[in-house]
Image (tube, rainbow, N blue to C red):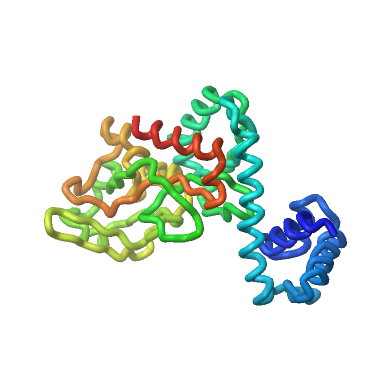
Amino acid sequence: MDKLRAITVFRRVIELGSFKAAAEDMALSKAAISKNISELEDFLKTPLINRTTRKMHITENGQHYFNHVCAILDDLSNADLSIIESSHHLRGKIKISMPMSLGVLQINPAVCEFMQLHPEISVEVTMVDQYVDLVKDGIDVAIRGGGELKNSNLRFRKLLDLKRILCASPKYIEHAKELISPSDLCLHNCLVYSLSSSPRHWVFSHLDKTEAVNLTPGSYVVNNGLALKQAVQAGLGISLTPELFVEKEIESGELVNLLPEWKAQSHALYAVYPYHKEQSQKVRTFIDFLVDYFNR
């Protein structure tokens, strides 16, 4: 038995949730995956995975073993990276996930600048607004926008505060009811970004006052920020959106900043990465570059 190969196979089976997915990911046959797991279980004299024709479940001993081998494999990978990346010139691939609208407007220009500085780095970018599983999909860094991130097995660094504002077109305002405070939003057609951490719960503060608004469904819900902006420009209603999406339209008068004295609950842009990527020089350098880029 090639023990290193066997524990690597075991890890991917657990991470991906099936023998078939691990076989496709590792370019092995399903029989080879099964053989590696069986040999490992025979060596350890305990079942690691209970499997039927339809499902698989990790055993208690399997979970304990999985936690240990992940740490060992990550240490081996980091040892390799410490040598491979020891030269002044960074090389290799970085896989990045980023939201579509923010990616096009703000993040991808930074990625291009980083690649100009490090020509031996190649980048694979996936633009998708939904959150991805970084470990399962082999992502080195994900750029995510939202409220304060919860503790998890992921690490993160804040890149940019995202000020959000209420806005609408003059066409909508002309025929809509008066908006004096956030509580009046219930009288308006509020357009919603569905992937927000709180798509129908908007919180605003002004001086020592806080108002939370639970919205009734508006006529337009979308999972893309630029599409939401287009709906607002068309006069369909009011949106709560990052200011950087609409600052040119606000300046030109195409859109109007509503209730500017009320501050929406803060969101931010984060670089998120698996904990075992902390030792990767190219990942650390890329994230340091992003922090500096957005500080500029």
User: Would you identify the image quadrant in which residue 46 lies?
Assistant: bottom right
Please provide percent x and percent y for residue 217. Answer: 38, 63
Please tell me which residue is depicted at 60% across the width and 41% down the height of the picture: 95
Residue 159 drawn at (x, y percent): 39, 41
The residue located at (34%, 65%) in the rendering is 216
User: Can I make out residue 278 in this image?
Assistant: yes
How many numbered markers are drawn?
A: 0
Q: Nearer the viewer, residue 60 or 258?
A: 60
Left or right of residue 248, residue 155 in this image: right
Front position in the image: 244 or 55: 55
Left or right: where does residue 72 sit relative to residue 223? right
Q: Which quadrant: the N terminus?
A: bottom right
- Quarter that holds the C terminus: top left
Residue 163: which quarter of the image? top left
Q: Position of residue 160 (x, y in %)?
A: 36, 41
Relative to 15, does residue 125 appear above or below in the rendering? above
Q: Is residue 295 left or right of residue 75?
A: left
Q: Is residue 21 visible?
A: no
Residue 134 percent across, percent down from the top left: 57, 52
Residue at left offset 51%, top offset 28%: 114
Task: Say which residue appears at 58% left-offset and 29% top-offset.
Answer: 90
Q: Against 114, is 16 above or below? A: below
Can you name the residue that lies furthest to the left here? 208
- Along the line of sight, the residue nearer the viewer: 105 or 275: 275
Q: Is residue 244 above or below residue 138?
A: above
On the rendered structure, is 178 left or right of 114?
left
For the residue pair 154 and 85, the one nearer the viewer reads as: 85
